[in-house]
């Protein structure tokens, strides 16, 4: 979300040794003239205030989703645990965006003075958060797809297959893998293999999820005929509704993150051609799309789940009515006050 001379960090632009915030700090006095001289018809400038506003809205939305899932016992199921983790992944993008934008604005206006070394460490932390977000988001989308697949095709054995203990184990493994991979990506950010790994992982997860969804939607109708009991039929409808919800989530993810991964692919294939150079100049727009993904996901959860939507309304009502600590706790955990 920085200007063109300072944005190319690990997964954002070409391989540069200095961090994004460090470059910004060291060149802040010269950037204005350089931007004017190097501006082309392809350039696009987006106000940093827009990044900050979208990041804050996204952060609040995802916090509400997490609190709603914690509050409502009816949402204490593996699928919603995975959705909760997906919301946390979106929160990582929001937090990284808000922190980076605030630091940039304070530095730009001379309200914050930090050393290049401190900025370099901060930028590494922000990169790890962003990278953890994309890896964990893709992983949880695959996990939710697999969960819906089991729900539809192994409905009678679902609770024995996807137990709470297994769900927690899967969640722990995904987060551990995501954080470890992100740290390794940052440490070896100058290697082309990092971008290759990210793009490959993106493609593999999309193919895996697409295959599961195709199988679900093609055979769901046939499978539903085998389950004639009223309860099971309702369960089948609920499962398909969950599959449709996650299909929407996957589609939004591809639309919002697709330009970013295309950006990475073009870095490998045509880093100096006029078309690619022009495409690179729209990187700020790609960042806006990524933040919008974090902003849109909670709206999809609320729209597709009546139970979650009802709980979100209760949370908003509680926050508007009172700010007393004991009342807020009672609002979040009502069963402990009964």
Image (cartoon, rainbow, N blue to C red):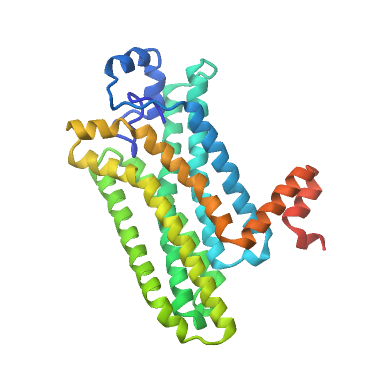
Quadrant showing the N terminus = top left
Q: Is residue 246 above or below residue 232?
A: above
Q: Is residue 336 left or right of residue 225?
A: right
* Rendered location of residue 331, percent (x, y): 75, 53
Side of 94 where 45 appears, left or right: left
The spot of residue 45 in percent (x, y) is: 39, 25
**Res. 177 visible in picture:** no
| Viewer-nearest residue: 139 or 206 | 206
Q: Position of residue 54 (x, y in %)?
A: 52, 36
Give the left or right position of residue 273, taking residue 197 as reference: left
| Residue appearing at x 31%, y 49% in the figure | 198
**Residue appearing at x 46%, y 76% in the figure:** 152
Q: Which one is nearer the viewer's eye here, 134 or 302? A: 302
Residue 21 in view here:
yes
- Residue sitting at 42 percent across and 41 percent down? 289
Q: Is residue 175 above or below residue 91?
A: below
Q: Position of residue 144 (x, y in %)?
A: 46, 64
Work out which quarter of the rendered image holds the C terminus and state it.
bottom right
Q: Is residue 152 above or below residue 257?
A: below
Residue furthest right in the image: 338
| Residue 75 located left or right of residue 297 | right
Please give the count of numbered marks on the rendered protein. 0
Q: Residue at x 62, y 59 (%)?
A: 308
The vertical placement of 313 against 192, above or below, is: below
Please identify the quarter of the rendering in which residue 208 is found.
Answer: bottom left
């Amino acid at each position: 979300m920085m200007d063109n001379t300072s944005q190319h960090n690990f997964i954002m632009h070409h391989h540069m040794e200095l961090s994004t915030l460090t470059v910004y700090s060291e060149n802040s006095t010269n950037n204005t003239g350089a931007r004017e001289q190097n501006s082309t018809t392809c350039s696009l400038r987006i106000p940093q205030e827009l990044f900050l506003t979208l990041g804050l809205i996204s952060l609040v939305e995802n916090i509400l989703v997490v609190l709603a899932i914690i509050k409502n016992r009816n949402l204490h199921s593996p699928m919603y645990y995975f959705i909760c983790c997906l919301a946390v992944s979106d929160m990582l993008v929001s937090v990284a965006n808000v922190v980076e934008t605030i630091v940039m604005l304070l530095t730009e206006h001379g309200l914050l003075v930090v050393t290049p070394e401190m900025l370099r460490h901060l930028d590494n932390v922000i990169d790890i958060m962003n990278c953890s977000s994309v890896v964990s988001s893709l992983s949880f989308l695959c996990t939710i797809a697999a969960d819906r697949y089991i729900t539809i095709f192994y409905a009678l054995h679902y609770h024995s297959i996807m137990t709470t203990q297994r769900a927690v184990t899967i969640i722990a493994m995904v987060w551990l893998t995501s954080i470890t991979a992100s740290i390794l990506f940052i440490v070896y950010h100058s290697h082309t293999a990092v971008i290759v790994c990210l793009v490959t992982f993106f493609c593999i997860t999309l193919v895996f999820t697409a295959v599961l969804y195709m199988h679900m939607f093609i055979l769901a109708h046939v499978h539903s005929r085998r389950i004639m009991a009223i309860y099971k039929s309702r369960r089948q409808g609920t499962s398909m509704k969950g599959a449709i919800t996650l299909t929407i989530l996957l589609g939004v993810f591809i639309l919002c993150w697709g330009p970013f991964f295309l950006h990475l692919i073009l870095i490998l294939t045509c880093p100096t051609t006029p078309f690619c150079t022009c495409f690179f100049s729209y990187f700020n727009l790609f960042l806006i799309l990524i933040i919008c993904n974090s902003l849109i996901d909670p709206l999809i959860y609320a729209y597709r789940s009546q139970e979650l939507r009802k709980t979100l309304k209760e949370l908003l009502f509680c926050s508007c009515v009172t700010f007393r600590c004991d009342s807020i706790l009672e609002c979040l955990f009502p069963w402990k006050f009964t």
